[in-house]
Image (tube, rainbow, N blue to C red):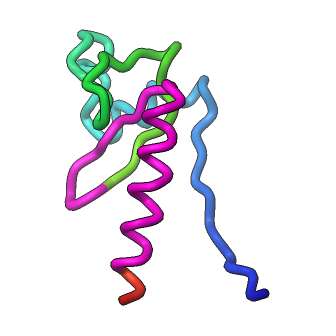
Amino acid sequence: MDKENKELKAVHERDLDNLLSKISKKEDFYAGKIKCKFCNEIINKENLYSLYSESGSINFICAKPQCIAEFMEHTANRKKKDIQ
């Protein structure tokens, strides 16, 4: 079985504000204007699971199990398309 090397980029909770500032989303985040890509729930510090870049935009994912599952499936499908 081949092992794939993957780079994981993570941000510690205490560095979240810096990241949000860098991507120009800090004001929208704290104003409740950022929503989960999959369920449209407003994202906050308590329910933020992940964020990722796709087609030039930043998507946010909440911590609901069904949204995490959709995110995993979505990224797996993207990788399959990239390989083809």
Q: Is residue 34 above or below residue 24?
A: above
Q: Quadrant of residue 81?
A: bottom left
Q: Is residue 3 above or below residue 27?
A: below
Q: Quadrant of residue 82?
A: bottom left
Q: Nearer the viewer, residue 29 or 48?
A: 48
**Percent coordinates x, y for residue 56 in the rendering:** 21, 58
- Looking at the image, residue 33 sits to the left or right of residue 67; the answer is left
Q: Nearer the viewer, residue 63 or 58?
A: 63
Q: Which residues are magenta?
A: 54-81
**Percent coordinates x, y for residue 42 in the rendering:** 30, 16
Q: Nearer the viewer, residue 23 or 2?
A: 2
Residue at (26%, 12%) from the top-left corner?
32
- Residue 38 falls within the magenta-colored stretch: no
Residue at (43%, 27%) from the top-left corner?
62
Residue at (36%, 89%) from the top-left corner?
84
Q: Nearer the viewer, residue 42 or 38?
A: 38
The kind of secondary structure the magenta stretch mainly shows is: helix
- Residue 65 falls within the magenta-colored stretch: yes
- Looking at the image, residue 63 sits to the left or right of residue 21; the answer is right
- Looking at the image, residue 55 sits to the left or right of residue 80; the answer is left
- Looking at the image, residue 1 sits to the left or right of residue 74; the answer is right
Q: Residue furthest right?
A: 1
- Total label count? 0
Which quadrant of the figure contains the N terminus?
bottom right
Residue at (58%, 53%) from the top-left corner?
9
Q: Is residue 9 above or below residue 51?
A: below
Q: Is residue 62 above or below residue 2?
A: above
**Percent coordinates x, y for residue 79 in the rendering:** 43, 73
**Percent coordinates x, y for residue 44 in the rendering:** 41, 15
Q: Quadrant of residue 17?
A: top left
